[in-house]
Amino acid sequence: MAASSFTTSSILFPFTTSSKSPPSQLFPSFPCKHHTLRLRPVSVSAASTPTPSIQADKSPVSATPSKLLPFRIGHGFDLHRLEPGYPLIIGGINIPHDRGCEAHSDGDVLLHCVVDAILGALGLPDIGQIFPDSDPKWKGCASSVFIHESVRLMHEAGYEIGNLDATLILQRPKLSPHKDAIKANLSALLGVDSSVVNIKAKTHEKVDSLGENRSIAAHTVVLLMKK
Amino acid sequence: MKVPYFKPKPTSQTQILLSLRLRPVSISVSAASTPTPSSIQVDKSPVSATPSKLLPFRIGHGFDLHRLEPGYPLIIGGINVPHNRGCEAHSDGDVLLHCVVDAILGALGLPDIGQIFPDSDPKWKGCASSVFIHEFVSNICLPFSSLSISHTTFGYFYCTIVDFNSIPVFNG
């Protein structure tokens, strides 16, 4: 399945994005309905003059300084409810478990928040806006499609991945036996060496929905470097 | 009678976003690679078999959660905070120091705190969390990274501490 581009109408970007879809296609005018909480602590708008948190010694000055930042950071968060009868897919790997994620796509919390971290670092709309739940085109879609699209946007903006660190929060099952497979698959999807990707898992100490095995969550931070 | 969907229990939750700046003095990697000069030269970053080791910057993330119970001290960042309950844990239950350790380990691509200082090891029982930081900086971080401690700068910490005890119960 070919991933489609999105139009840039009504949204300002610090760089030009090519689009294959017709110009008349717009983002939905209504706010996207999110089933999960998404946090975006990092944002860069073209209209403002952002202050880089990391002062490179010779950072260039230009009309759109954010475009030329040598480094960018992004954060992603995703949470899905666990229900019986669904597969549990983490990082593209099917994990044996008695319940899985009920979601519009395949409910892969790790890939979803990796996408959000990359998009956030680039100052782009988040995964729910680019791949809205209301669009049947993405229903049941493998999350690897979203990864490929965000990686394409990243390279188009002139960046590549420096390193990535992810924290999975789930009470069960134990992820240790699957960590290497998840890491290898995520590295392959991103097109990077596996030493660039790090994954860890934590329990939620049996507290609230995460600790009671009723949900699963993930955090990801990513460092992007100018090519 | 409706059962509240969200019934918060007293917990202390810490999330930390760490930007770790490393200035490599000498890096023992494959002979084919070119070590990065001490100054940051992004435009001339060398291509090598293990590119991540030569990054001038790395980013990591840590998360930790401990239950709050009466009769325990509440220690955050090594500071004993006066409170009527504290963290029940294998060590001293310092959520902040725990996830600082995890963030640094994650930035370096190393195993997490639970693997390096396992709950099953009685050596770490009741241990102050500052020991974990000292332990991995001197024995784990430096040998792996071939870094001199004086050249390691912890760039930026973004830290959120959430005490669920202060969140009102949802009566939905």
Image: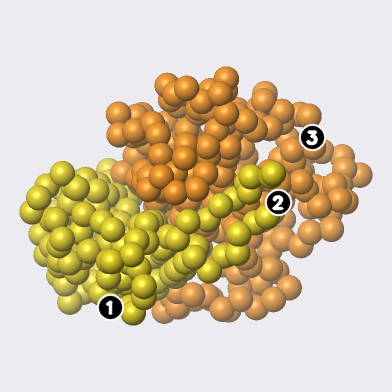
Chain colours: A orange, B yellow
Question: Which residue in the structure is indicated by mark 1?
Answer: B79
Q: Position of residue B3 (x, y in %)?
A: 64, 45
Residue under the point 60% across and 44% down: A150
Q: Position of residue B17 (x, y in %)?
A: 42, 64
Query: Mark 3 touching mark 1, by CB under 8 A?
Result: no
From the viewer's side, name the closer residue of A9 and A100.
Answer: A100
Badge number at residue B172: 2
Badge number at residue B162: none
- Whether B39 is drawn above or below A139: the answer is below
Q: Can residue A174 be seen here?
A: yes
* 1 or 2: mark nearer the eye: 2
* Chain containing the residue with disc 2: B
Q: Quadrant of residue B63?
A: bottom left
**Quarter of the image with the N terminus of chain A in it:** top right
Q: CA distance from mark 3 to mark 1?
A: 50 Å
Q: Position of residue A5 (x, y in %)?
A: 73, 40
Q: Position of residue B150 (x, y in %)?
A: 17, 77
Question: Which residue in the structure is indicated by mark 3?
Answer: A135
Under mark 3, the amino acid is Asp
Among numbered discs 1 and 2, the one appearing first in the sequence: 1
Disc 1 is placed on an element classified as strand
* 3 or 1: mark nearer the eye: 1
Q: Quadrant of residue B37?
A: bottom left
Q: Sort mark 2 into few (<14), some (14-19) or many (20+) by Cα contacts within 10 Å.
A: few
Under mark 1, the amino acid is Ile
Residue under the point 21% across and 74% down: B151
Disc 2 is placed on an element classified as loop
Q: CA distance from mark 1 to mark 2?
A: 37 Å
Q: CA distance from mark 3 to mark 2?
A: 30 Å
From the viewer's side, name the closer residue of B23 and A205.
Answer: A205
* Chain containing the residue with disc 3: A
Query: Mark 1 touching mark 2, by CB under 8 A?
Result: no
